[in-house]
Image: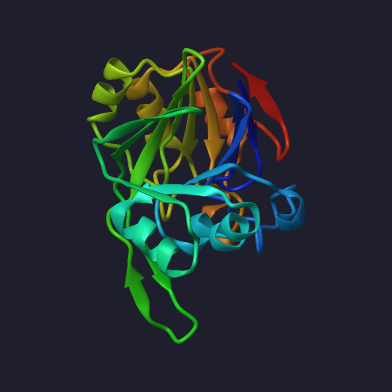
Amino acid sequence: MKVSYHGHSVIKIETNGKTILLDPFITGNELTDLKVEDVKPDVIILTHGHGDHLGDTVELAKKNGSLVIGTAEMAAYIGFQGVEKTHAMHIGGSYEFDFGKVKLTPAFHGSGFITDDNQIIYLGMPAGVLFMAEGKTVYHAGDTGVFSDMKLIGERHPIDLAFLPIGDNFTMGPEDAALAAKFLNPKQVVPIHYNTFPPIKQDPHKYVEMLDEGIGKVLEAGESVEL
């Protein structure tokens, strides 16, 4: 399994002959190395409905016939935009797809989309994502604050690679994200959701220094790890 980071909270997983994109915020993301016209995901998984996570989902899914996975409210909304293939889930639920198993976990945040005419569309509860394939487990925390049930997530599903937000202001900051890493007890931790906007400016290397030795890894956009 190849897992790569592409700026902000964009993660790409390549496994079982499929390309899976999580939170494909590409247009307007100055930190990404991706271009919408070059990305061809088979599957898109969404943590929540904010624009910097929902991103280019509709365009990518329509162009590539991608399957979009998210909470029931997000799946319905994406379907209303003309995307033909969606799979609705909700927190605590899991589903075995032909490319891997997906389970949605709690996340403490919000989820809604602001339209061009200044309306807010509620898109259900935010979530984290556990992705399991090839005997490995990847955790994308989504946007969240730290919460003690992260211990339960890590105990029930031993995590090989965790992507944790560190930007503060909208999510947990470095100190809380370091505590989250202790709760989750993953083999590797990669920081996400930082430096995209002024309020979430952080030094990811300082965050890694807060973690137990050897588990933290800063990935630049386009860099990957093999599991």
Relative to the observer, which residue lies in front, 28 or 65? Answer: 65
Residue 204 sits in quarter: top right
Quarter of the image where the N terminus is located: top right
Residue 47 appears in the rendering:
no
Counting from the top left corner in percent of width and height, residue 178 is at 42, 29
**Residue positioned 39% across, 53% down in the render:** 48
Q: How is the image coloured?
A: rainbow
- Quarter containing the C terminus: top right
Q: Position of residue 146 (x, y in %)?
A: 32, 38
Q: Quadrant of residue 103?
A: top left
Say above or below: 85 vs 148.
Answer: below
User: Percent x, y for residue 196?
Assistant: 61, 55
Q: Residue at the spot x=49%, y=67% of the render?
A: 82
Number of marks drawn: 0
Residue drawn at x 54%, y 35% as measured from the top left: 191
Q: Is residue 127 above or below residue 82?
A: above
* Residue at image location 54% in from the left, 62% down from the top: 58
Left or right of 82? Residue 18 is right
Q: Is residue 64 visible?
A: yes
On screen, 206 above or below 79? above
Q: Quadrant of residue 3?
A: top right
